[in-house]
Amino acid sequence: MFSLLVGAVSAGIFGIFALTVKIPDFNALLERKIVQSTKIYDQNAETLLYDIHRDIKRTLIPFSQIPRHVKNATVAIEDNNFYYHRGIDLFSIGRAFIANLLAGEITQGGSTITQQLIKNSFLTPERTLTRKLKELILTLKIERQYPKEKILEIYLNEIPYGSSSYGIEAAAQTFFAKNAKDLNLAQAAYLAAMPKAPSYYSPYGQHQDELEKRKNLVLERMAALDFIGNEEKEAGQKEKVEFLDRNKNETLKAPHFTIMVKQYLEDKYGEEAVSGGGLKVITTLDWNLQKKAEEIAEQYAKENKEKFNALNTALAAVNPKTGAVLAMVGSKDYFAEPEPKGCAPGVNCLFEGNFNAALASRQPGSAFKPFAYATAFKKGYTPETALFDLATEFNPDCDPDVEVQKKITAEILAKNPNHEDKCYHPANYDNIFRGPITMKEALAQSINVPSVKTLYLAGLMDTIKTAREMGLTTLTDPQRYGLTLVLGGGEVRLLEMVGAYAVFANDGVKAAPYFIKKVEDANGKILEEHQPEEKRILDEQTARLINGALSDNKARAPAFGENSWLYFPDRPVAAKTGTTNDYRDAWIVGYAPNFALGAWAGNNDNSPMEKKVAGFIVAPMWNAFMKEALKELPKEEFKKPKVNSAAKPVLKSQWRGGEIYFLDKISKKLATNFTPPEMIEEKILTQIHSILYWVDKNDPLGPKPINPENDPQFKLWEFAVKKWKDSQNISEETNENLTKEFDDAHKPAYQPKINLISPKNELISQDNLYIKAEIQSYFNIVQVDFFLDGVLLGSKKFPPYELFYDFTGKNYFSGKANLIIKAYDEAGNKNVLEYPLTFN
């Protein structure tokens, strides 16, 4: 009884509420002005980057001028039961509920066209029960009050299609430069696909493939509803539609950056809030830097097009200490026409201005190498670790002799051109193999073969883990990359690469990259405000070792020259270039302690450039912008790493062997406990092997491997090293080659004997001091030093070993002090005499 009473009361309240809700005036809707616009500013809130509704476009047309294909395409994709329901489609709601439940997230909606019109045009965006009830009641009332044709007419005149275009007529003019009544089937399908997420499905944005798929889905649904036949559907899917080039809009500043911000806002707050919520957005963009970046990018893009057939370029800059994105240029000119001329946007275009190369996934070439070296350094390898730069096969299933394997592969390809060559023996950029080289030299000079070996030693998965922790999000297919990862086998984004390199610049601490400082609503309420987020990713030593290698101009000079584009005479700057093997991408990422900058050049469709390394293609542009940025920043130095104290010879640049013995420098015999440390010379028994002979790759500081041949790469690396050793006519040594005699130049009996003659058993005058000693020695005395409480009074190289010291005008000693006499012979033997003195 109680439940029935509650139900009756609720129904009564709902009925009264329904009666009070008035049907909105459609004419008032069409005549209304757009609500407050969202404004996006630079970091100082002084430069307006974009007023989202300043240039809004809307033209109302009657139902008769809206073509059949537009009506049918919209109904097919948005509400296929539009003509049959009475405003609420329970079947669609149920289907969406089940789909969302199975997916674990909202993937479908059940709103009808009428509900969407009510929700977007007449109600506020808050999510409350009252608002939902109003939407339900208004939908039912409007469906009873107006015919379906009127509802669809208003809907098609009202909805946003993107690029500030509201309504089908404005959209037709914006995207195709024609009236809506003249749209063909394929064009109508494209426009019907956009309203779901206008920025995401924009033909001028980053998701053109997704727009194409959704357009085809529209045509599929139209055919399923018998709006079109299968032949029309297939023709519409195959038709190449050309979108109108966007005219330059002076109110849109830093366009690639600003569109990225707009997309973020729409993803987080929704299309409604951004299109009419009156948001105030303060970004991290440095407008002065951005203007310089755009000017420099446009200038050098012209040169790159003429010299290298590189039609596009991009720049991204980050503050390593805060993570703030200071500048971003996604292409040489956001508003330029696609090239080659006449190429349809998104279809085999070498260049499209709106394409944001700073966010595109591209192969980084050797610019990825620092992540592998950093991972190796974390494990205990050092910049002085000795590797061999030699022609090396890395696939254990292939012949270890690279030249032999090349011939085998050539014979197979001659018989079967479709054969997939799985052997891997990378060359260096200059096709030169240098023999022994240190990790630091290999990184600084960007030598490929030792870098592949470094990745193997560091571990593929551990290296990917390091890169991910530093900020790279796109390395999701390790098995596809294999050892090619270190040469750029995995795709990354320029902006993320700059953020990752910024971790090196910031001494191993990651300040999470961000591009929005604050967002306020129309009433000034703060919706979000950036909070500093820092996390140590690399230990200080690892970061400093990478900084040292990448900023050492002497170390990279053999490859780049003393005065390359990477060198700044008066500032510490670290840099790494990268060029893909097929010359499709040219990179450079570099940094000072307080500024990180990356640059890219190439073609949007991945077609190759001229065969030049990145130092020639993109480094000049990077250098020009880096100079401009550093002018405004204080000079900061990279912190120095600790001195390497590794015990293993191979970790200390010793490539001749791993067995150590010690000789006395004088006698050239084996050192003993009596050999002075400064007289000991460390020697290596010449036994030339790859590093895998001397270290366990997973524990480089641990004991030497007992069975190194168990490592799958051991035989391959050893073969290359042995072949090189034989070509160099280097003779190896064993313990039998060592001298069996021990140092006989340093014995306790050979220490100089010091006999003090003066002063002795007497008070010392405060005015002067006379010192005399007699010294006996097996070897010739080379020097005698006289000290008083650590203060050097003088030295004698020849007898008599005496000294007069006058205290006049000097700080003299009173009370007690120690006289110290040190004697050294030519063999390095020494002795010390201490004698207490008393001053009167």
Image (tube, helix red, strand yellow):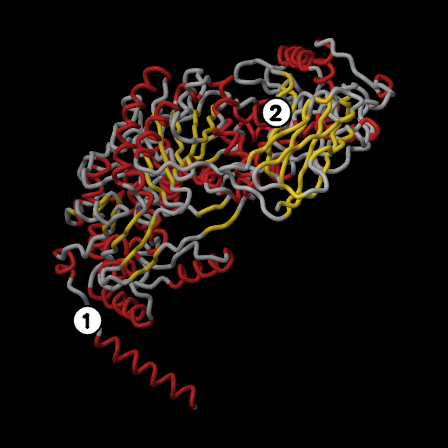
Q: Is residue 128 left or right of residue 458?
A: left
Q: Is residue 839 visible?
A: yes
The circle drawn on residue 22 is 1
At x 39%, y 57%, the residue is 109
What amino acid is at disc 1?
Lys
What amino acid is at disc 2?
Thr
* x and y percentages locating residue 667 in the rendered image: 79, 19
Q: Is residue 719 above or below residue 109?
A: above
Residue sitting farthest toward the bottom: 1
In the image shown, does 789 or 429 lie closer to the viewer? 789
In the image shown, does 801 or 551 lie closer to the viewer? 801
Q: Look at mark 2 in the image and give the residue it sits on.
A: 438
* x and y percentages locating residue 729 in the rendered image: 74, 9
Q: Is residue 660 above or below residue 428?
A: below
How far apart, in angstroms, are the residues tagged by discs 1 and 2?
80 Å
Would you identify the image quadrant in which residue 381 lies?
Answer: top right
Would you identify the image quadrant in which residue 97 lies?
Answer: bottom left
